[in-house]
Structures are given as structure tokens and as C-alpha cells.
Image (cartoon, coloured by chain):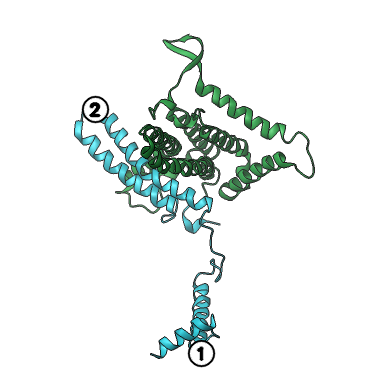
Chain colours: A cyan, B green
Amino acid sequence: MADKDRADDARKAGRDPPSADEAALSARLRDLGERLGRHHPDRPPDSEPRPTADPSAIARGFRLSTELVAGVLVGAGIGWLLDRWLGSSPLGMIVFLLLGFVAGVLNVMRAAGVVQPNRLDPPDRRP
Amino acid sequence: MDPIHQFQITNLLTFGHIGGYEIAFTNSALFMLIALAVIAALTIGATSSRALVPGRMQSVAEMSYEFVADTLRSSAGSEGMKFFPLVFSLFMFILAVNVIGIIPYMFTVTSHIIITASLALLVFVIVYGYGFWKNGLRFLRLFAPSGIPIILMPLIVFIEVMSHLSRPLSHSLRLFANMLAGHITLKVFGGFVVMLGGLGFLGSLVAILPLGMTVALTALELLVAFLQAYVFAVLTCVYLNDAIHPGH
């Protein structure tokens, strides 16, 4: 009942001054944001929201959409060619289709930044 | 009404035959030349005044330079700037060709996989050629990650090689498929308008729906035309980065 009254008051006043528990909540939120910022120093605590029409985000989406397909197609192509040359009819296709699928998944994970791209130097020798 | 008809290659001028193949100037070649003329007009014509305070066209030319240079610098470093002519040519060519293709009655050059595949193979050959030229056989270790047990090595090398082989395929397929699918969709919805319009008054009323769809799709295609050129340029930069900085 009290909640309903307060809601009615707020509607009448348009906006009400922040009550005590709201102030406490925002203080806790700020505290949490600061602690998260300490864990992720690369992310500023209140960075501006990225615009939804960010070209690089849409570009990444377009990129992800074909990486898997390309891996599977390359696997199927190599398998088909090997079968034609060596006469090992279903085997080459099966093996290379699976390998192509793995390569496609690897492509997608690299494109999404989940897996670090393969570099010539191991990470401990990096400058 | 045939939605595929717009991709028909027609010979405009036949020069002769080499090895049983007809060598001809096609409508595809004509639209490549038109794109070239547009780019030349933008980059040479608009900047010829060399105004300190750029005019409208000059600032478009300067913005496209800045855009590509920023993209290249951020993904391949300042060393990658030696490949700026390549990336800028690719970006401007694909952008011009895509945008010209949206105009009604115009031919879309990039809706043929032979064009996008040759562009992607050009990038592929340059990236791996430069990688081997600069790093020597050490570049081969790109296919063999360190810290892998020796038993797994052949399998991992196979997968890595296939992952690298799929690059030109996905590079060309993305541009080709997006342009082809977009233009077919536009044509199909346009065909709906004509078909419904022929059904009398009620049909004409319903035809408003696909007409609105066509308008919306044209706007989407304009976005896709720019984005595909951008994606092609960005991935070229990413692949070039592998060849320039394999060490870090």
C-alpha cells in the first residue's frame, strides 16, 4: 500500500528527490564499477556506449558469416581432388571434410578473437 | 522479370579468338572502366585545384584517403603503409563498382565470382609472396604453432594449412555472395510490384508492401556496398599484417 502511494506521489510530482535507498544503490553501483575497472584496467569505468552502426562491428559480423563455410568448402575440395587422383573414394572426402570443419571453426574463433592468431615467436620471447 | 538476367555477360566488342576462347570487351569490362573513370575523376579531378580549404569533392577524396590510411595503420602498423596503394585501389575499386551496381540498369561487376576470386587471389599471392620474401623459410613456421606435442604436429599443420587456404575462398565468397544475394532480392521484390500491379486495383494496393520493401532494401544495399568494400580492405590489412609482422 505504501509503495502504491509513493508511486502515485512520484507520478504527480513528475520526479521525486532521490530517496535514501536509491542513493545507497547508486553508491554501491559506483563502487562496483570502480572495482570492475581495477580488474579490467583496459576498460575505462564509464566509457561511452559504442554506436550500433559501428562499421567495424558489422564488418566483423560479415566476416564471421563466411569463415566457417570457407573452411568446410576447402576441406571438401581437397578431399574430392584426392579421391579423384588416388581413387580412395569415400575416405579422402570424409577425412578432409572433417579437417576442413575443424579449420573452419578455428577460422571463426580467430576472427572472433577467442583464440590468439598463430605467431612465429612463442609468447615468452615477445619483446 | 528473370532475377538472374541482370548478371548476364554480353560481348560488346569482339577482338578475336585465342586458344578457342573469345577475347571480347564485355559489359563487365565496360563497367569496370566506368568505375575507374569515377575514381579517377574523384582522386585526380577533384584534387587538381589543391585548395588549402578543400571543396566538397576534394574533401571526399581526402576523407577516403584518411579512412583507408587509418584502417591500414591500425591493423598493419605504419610499416604496412608501403602497401597503401594496393589497399586503397582495392577499396576504391570495390566501393565504386558496388555503388554503381545499385543504380538501376547498371551492371554489378562484383556479383561474378571470377572478379572477386581474382582480387582475393591477388591479395593471397602478394601476402604469401611478401611473407616468404621477407622472412624466408621461417615463414613456414606460421603453420606450426610452438608448444604442440610432436604426435599432434601433422594434424595441426594440416588444419593450419587448410585454415590459410580457406582465406582467399572466404575473402572472395563474402563479397560475391553479398552482392549477388542483395541484387537478386531487390529484383524479386521489384518483380512482385509489377506482378501485383497487373492484378487490378486490389493488387495495386497490396503492391505497396513490396514497393516499400524495395525502397528499404535499396538503402540496405547501399550500406552493404560500402561495408563489403570496407571488409575486403580490412581483411587485406589483417592478412598483410601476418606477412609484415610475423614476430609479434
Find residue B200 and report its image quarter: top left
**Residue A20: which numbered mark, if any?**
1
Report the front residue among A69 and A106.
A69
Both marks 1 and 2 on one chain: yes
The reply to whether dot 1 and dot 2 touch (C-beta < 8 Å) is no
Compare marks 1 and 2 and give the one earlier in the sequence: 1
Distance, label 1 to label 2, CA atoms, is 79 Å
**Residue A86: which numbered mark, if any?**
2
Residue B125 lies left or right of residue A81; in this view the side is right
Q: In this view, which residue lies farthest toward the top? A: B16
Is there any visible trace of residue B51 in the rendered image? Answer: yes
Across and down, in percent, residue B85 comes to: 62, 36
Give the quarter of the figure containing the N terminus of chain B. top left
Across and down, in percent, residue B13 comes to: 52, 13
Is there any visible trace of residue A120 in the rendered image? Answer: no
Report the front residue among B231 and B103.
B103
Across and down, in percent, residue B41 comes to: 67, 31
Which residue does the image show at 72% across and 31% down from the upper left?
A: B45
Across and down, in percent, residue A38 comes to: 52, 74
Q: Chain of mark 1?
A: A
**Classed neighbour count for the residue bearing mark 1: other residues with Cα under 10 Å, few (<14), some (14–19), many (≥20):** few
Residue A26 lies left or right of residue B39; in this view the side is left
